[in-house]
Image (tube, rainbow, N blue to C red):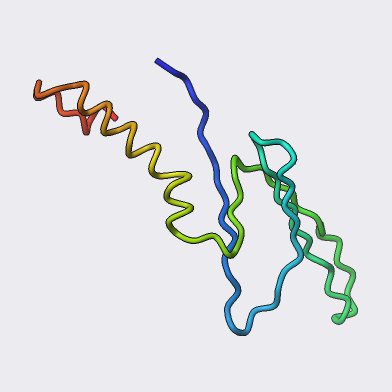
Amino acid sequence: MVKETIRVYARLKPLGRRQQAGIYSVDDDDKSVSSLEIIVPHDLADGFVNNKRENYKFKFQKIFDQEAKQDVVFDSIARPVAEWYVVLASNRGNTGSKIAFTV
């Protein structure tokens, strides 16, 4: 049996009509892990001191940009899982082993 970790993916949401673009950067240097850095600048217009963090960094297996189409996301993430399940189910045969409960 092959042991694998949980895979985490990100898909950046396209902006709505009235939404402002956020500040973010995607780092894909390492092929196994991509990192997403989000910058939330302090709002100085209020005149209050804001000590919250400005930079947030997250790591994902893959990050899909705002222009990524649904079929590209499916082919990258869901298709391998579906194909694995079909192979597993076909290897079980017709034994009545209730594969839905074993996956």
Query: Which image quadrant: the N terminus?
Result: top left
Q: Position of residue 88 (x, y in %)?
A: 27, 26
> In the image, what residue occupies the spot 22% across and 30% down?
101
Q: Nearer the viewer, residue 46 or 74?
A: 74
Q: Nearer the viewer, residue 7 or 67?
A: 67
* Residue 11 as seen in the image, left or right of residue 54: left
> In the image, what residue occupies the spot 43% across and 47% down?
75
Above or below residue 50? Residue 2 is: above
Q: Nearer the viewer, residue 59 or 27?
A: 27
Q: Position of residue 2 (x, y in %)?
A: 44, 18
* Residue 18 as seen in the image, left or right of residue 38: left
- Quarter of the image for residue 31 reads top right
Q: Position of residue 9 (x, y in %)?
A: 55, 46
The number of discs equals 0
> In the image, what residue occupies the spot 48% across and 52% down?
73
Query: Which image quadrant: the C terminus?
Result: top left
Q: Position of residue 55 (x, y in %)?
A: 80, 55
Above or below residue 13? Residue 6 is: above
Furthest residue to the top? 1
- Quarter of the image for residue 64 reads bottom right
> In the image, what residue occupies the spot 87% across and 81% down?
45
Furthest residue to the bottom? 18
